Image (spheres, rainbow, N blue to C red):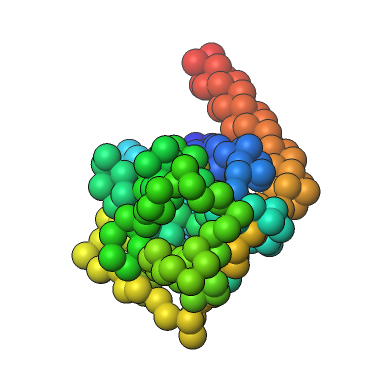
Amino acid sequence: MIKGIYSSGSGLQPRMTQLEILSNNIANSNTTGFKKDNLFIQVMKNAALSQIQGEGPLRGLDSKEFTDFSEGSFNQTNAPLDLAIQGRGFFVLDTPQGVRYTRNGNFSLSADGTVVNSDGYPLLGSSGKIQIPQPEKISEASISIDEYGNVTNGTTTLGKVRVADFQNPSDLKKDGASLFVSTGPEKPVELDVQHSLIRQGYLEESNVDPVESMVQLVELSKNFETDQHMVQSQDASLEKAMDVGRV
């Protein structure tokens, strides 16, 4: 009976984690460039027995959170500094905490002509920050960014958007809703047009399917409640058995 309690209870913690992940995915379903998270759970041999022996509530359960980097759909905005990457790769930002990577291409011009994201972090090009000279004399509508990332104003080249990629994206960890930081030893490589193209006037939407996620959330909530009831039921039966033993 005790083994049954641990067997039922072993799934509660992973399900709680899954509920938190799904809730966060749904909350960010409209966040530009957001990538949904998932939880991989592998039940190891003798998981319940390991718990009975006091080796921890997740002993025998191998759970790992991971990010799904699949491409989201594109939303056409026609804003000249809205950019989307078709294919692999990330935009590169210069932040006070160091370099960060993102698929959120919602950019604008700062007062000094630097191309920045919504947090004011500069977009990096192949040769550093991308800056527009004399921004007060140039309208954003006159800025052109081709599919190769070349930034021009008329016949004047102003820079080239850098697109970085990682062979092992699992080394990227989230730093906010749509920013990523590299935590592994791998150095990013700059992609060419064979692997990615830049689309001006578009933004990549979140890759979360709200309807699918809501269905999963409802199903997961029901499974969580079922596990709770089973634990409570078996605990009550154990209590009765102990009362009989006392008599």
Is residue 220 visible in the rendered image? The answer is: no
Left or right of residue 54, residue 243 in this image: right
Give residue 112's position: percent from left, percent from top: 37, 41
Quadrant of the rendered image containing residue 75: bottom right
Left or right of residue 225, residue 70 in this image: left
Which residue is nearer to you in this view: 34 or 222? 34
Residue at position x 55%, y 74% from top? 147
Quadrant of the rendered image containing residue 161: bottom left
Is residue 212 visible in the rendered image? The answer is: yes
Q: Is residue 173 above or below residue 149?
A: above
Give residue 175's position: percent from left, percent from top: 39, 44
Q: Is residue 151 above or below residue 98?
A: below
Residue at position x 51%, y 50% from top? 138
- Residue farthest to the front, as pictured: 137
Which residue is nearer to you in this view: 181 or 6? 181
Give residue 119's position: percent from left, percent from top: 44, 37
Residue at position x 55%, y 64% from top? 144
